[in-house]
Image: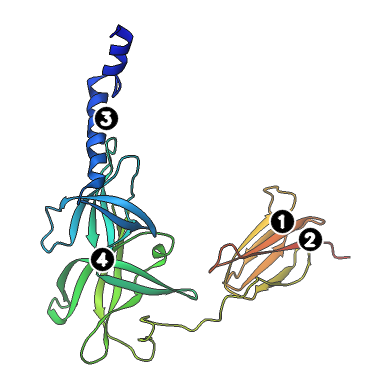
């Protein structure tokens, strides 16, 4: 064997001891794909292979596992996983993923349902802790508990806020336990809620849908219609309305950063625009649906003179 062939052979897995160690580790992990520890799961509704490395050291009831991604794949903190007919949350993830991505998978046996505009959304969650609550005089209220829960943090759950209520389990009397959010915090990229037990209200809570403070909303229209004038006299004010809940924005047709109108009395369905002391300029009023952000309507308005 000549030198070049020998050199190529010994360097096939890297030119340094570190590179070779890294290659052998990845090769060893690749073999795990055919082992019993490799499970098929759904991550964000996409089928993936995940290696169940061990039961977490903090696990007491087999509801938490240490997992690894197979080589050349990864996962992120806060992703939802469906495995073994149950919902799980990726609760932790290592920063050093040079060899593989490692994390913690926690069972989410509960579901938080809430109403966002006309949508009803569901998010699996797990309970971190329960504790008795105290009233203002520091007496323990045995019928109440305070608990902390964790769930994914995204564009929907970031809309949760204090005093929002949601339903829990239903027991023998047919009335569900209800919870009220008293505090929100981010913990390693996950949303942590502090909840206090609350009473079921049959006049505001919809037990069939599982939603507290349910409100009947009109269905989202197939298009956004902006109603209002097409011209505004300088220094005067005009009101514009939309046929559903929208987010308003204003831009200039000439794409400049100049201010041609001021905005006031902004609601989900209306806005007032007051023109500055200028004539001949055009602005574009945009209404974007709060339910479907791809549903957008524009109206061009010209600023005109008194005569």
Q: Which residue is mark 2?
A: 303
**Quadrant containing the C terminus in the rendered view:** bottom right
Mark 3 vs mark 4, foreground winner is 3
Check whether the beta carbons of the residues at disc 2 and disc 3 lie within 8 A of each other.
no
Label of residue 260 in the image: 1
Mark 3: few/some/many CA within 10 Å (<14, 14-19, 20+): some
- Position of 18 relative to 37 (above/below): above
Distance (Cα) linking label 2 and label 3:
68 Å
Q: Which residue is mark 3?
A: 23
Disc 2/disc 1 C-alpha distance (Å): 8 Å
Mark sitting earlier along the chain (3/1): 3
Where on the picture, by quarter, is residue 288?
bottom right
Q: Position of residue 281 (x, y in %)?
A: 78, 55
Q: Are marks 2 and 1 in contact (CB under 8 Å)?
A: yes
Residue assigned mark 4: 108
Q: In the rendered image, which quarter contains the N terminus?
A: top left
Q: Are marks 4 and 2 in contact (CB under 8 Å)?
A: no
User: How far, Cα to Cα, is label 4 from label 1?
Assistant: 52 Å
């Amino acid at each position: 064997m000549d030198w070049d062939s020998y050199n190529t052979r010994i360097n096939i897995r890297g030119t340094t001891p570190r590179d070779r160690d890294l290659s052998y580790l990845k090769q060893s992990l690749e073999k795990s794909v055919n082992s019993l520890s490799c499970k098929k799961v759904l991550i964000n509704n996409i089928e993936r292979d995940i290696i169940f490395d061990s039961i977490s050291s903090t696990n007491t009831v087999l509801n938490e596992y240490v997992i690894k991604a197979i080589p050349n794949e990864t996962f992120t903190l806060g992703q939802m996983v469906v495995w073994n007919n149950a919902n799980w949350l990726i609760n932790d993830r290592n920063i050093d993923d040079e060899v593989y991505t490692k994390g913690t998978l926690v069972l989410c046996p509960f579901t938080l349902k809430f109403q966002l505009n006309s949508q009803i959304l569901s998010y699996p969650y797990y309970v971190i802790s329960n504790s008795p609550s105290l009233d203002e005089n520091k007496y323990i209220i045995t019928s109440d508990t305070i608990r902390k829960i964790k769930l994914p943090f995204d564009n929907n759950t970031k809309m949760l806020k204090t005093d929002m209520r949601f339903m829990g389990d239903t027991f023998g009397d047919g009335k569900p336990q209800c919870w009220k959010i008293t505090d929100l915090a981010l913990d390693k990229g996950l949303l942590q809620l502090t909840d206090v037990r609350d009473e079921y209200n049959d006049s505001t809570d919809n037990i069939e849908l599982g939603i507290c403070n349910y409100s009947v909303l009109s269905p989202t229209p197939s298009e956004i219609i902006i109603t209002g004038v097409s011209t505004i006299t300088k220094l005067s004010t005009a009101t514009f309305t939309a046929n559903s809940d929208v987010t308003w924005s204003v831009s200039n047709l000439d794409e400049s950063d100049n201010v041609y109108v001021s905005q006031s009395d902004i609601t989900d369905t209306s806005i007032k625009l007051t023109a500055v002391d200028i004539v001949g300029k055009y602005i574009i009023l945009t209404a974007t649906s709060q339910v479907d952000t791809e549903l957008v309507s524009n109206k061009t308005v010209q600023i005109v003179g008194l005569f």
